[in-house]
Image (cartoon, helix red, strand yellow):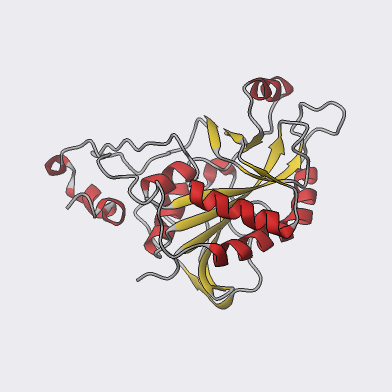
Amino acid sequence: MAEAKIGVIGGTGLYQIEGLTDAREIKVKTPFGDPSDAITVGKLEEVEVAFLPRHGRGHRLSPTEVPSRANIYALKSLGVERIIAVAGVGSLKEKIKPMDIVIPDQIIDRTRNRVNTFFSGGIVGHIAFAEPFCPVLSDILYESAHETGVRVHDGGTCIIMEGPQFSTRAESELYRSWGADIIFMTGLPEAKLAREAEICYATIAIVTDYDCWNETVESVSTEMVILNLQKSVGTAKKIIKLAVTNLSRKRDCICTTALKNCIATSPELIPEQVKKDLNLIIGKYIK
């Protein structure tokens, strides 16, 4: 049974959303294991929202350990059609300052140890991923951020690194030479899995530091990241509140039919257990 059409995945510093009414916790079982934590469903500005802390309450899971397939599947099972993700990020450009907000529109994948697809075990699917973030949802987030008065950047290329260590200075300079704008550890595989599940996905990136390339300021540290996130997480919550009320009920974007004609495997060759496990995702295309 559908519970909420909008999901929020909270990153470091955002483990709950105040102001949820009629809140209830739901523990979801998935074919891919347990999600990061129980999902809290409630009304935010009279809009049903499902909230999931990416790292679990108390920040127990490293970026590589986050069970992203279970998280996306669980939100999909609750009826979620749009996901607003929140993440702390490092800036790779002077003009993007700590405490700014970025609504990124491109990704360079530097992860190495993460399962990034639902399609395995006898089924192959190839989604288009040229536009990794939902453009419609991203526009709403940008407009909502602008409305709060925060300094916000419309678009930007993000490096998604494996972690949990921060970059070396050589890596940071390399990413700058590529023209990247920000760097963080958690945008993937979430964005890829959300697209496979035909869920709109966009990110509120909270800039916490200058990574380690800027030798005129202190290099990034966990203490710096957490301190600046604590200062900015209230702004992220304001953006979310505005965004959920500004979203139209009807979705009209590339995400809604992302899986159409993308499954390469002949239906009769897909194992029955795989069909069963993925029915929530492929059911409208494969019987």
Which one is in front, 157 or 159? Answer: 157
Q: Which residue lies furthest to the left in this view?
A: 268
The total number of labels drawn is 0
Q: Residue at x 52, y 47 (%)?
A: 66
The x and y percentages for residue 85 are 56, 52
Q: Which residue is drawn at 18% across and 43% down?
A: 270
Which one is in front, 127 or 193? Answer: 127
Quarter where residue 280 is shown: bottom left
Q: In this view, does 245 lie to the left or right of 255?
A: right
The x and y percentages for residue 199 are 42, 52
Q: Is residue 214 shown to the viewer in this render?
A: yes
In the displayed structure, 6 sits above or below 273; it is: below
Which one is in front, 57 or 173? Answer: 173
Q: In this view, does 66 lie to the left or right of 147?
A: left
Quarter containing the N terminus = bottom left
The x and y percentages for residue 32 are 38, 51
Q: Is residue 76 left or right of residue 213?
A: left
Q: Which residue lies furthest to the bottom in this view?
A: 22
Q: Which residue is drawn at 44% across and 41% down?
A: 192
In the displayed structure, 98 sits above or below 80; it is: above
Q: Is residue 35 shown to the viewer in this render?
A: no
The x and y percentages for residue 30 are 37, 57
In the displayed structure, 226 sits above or below 219; it is: below
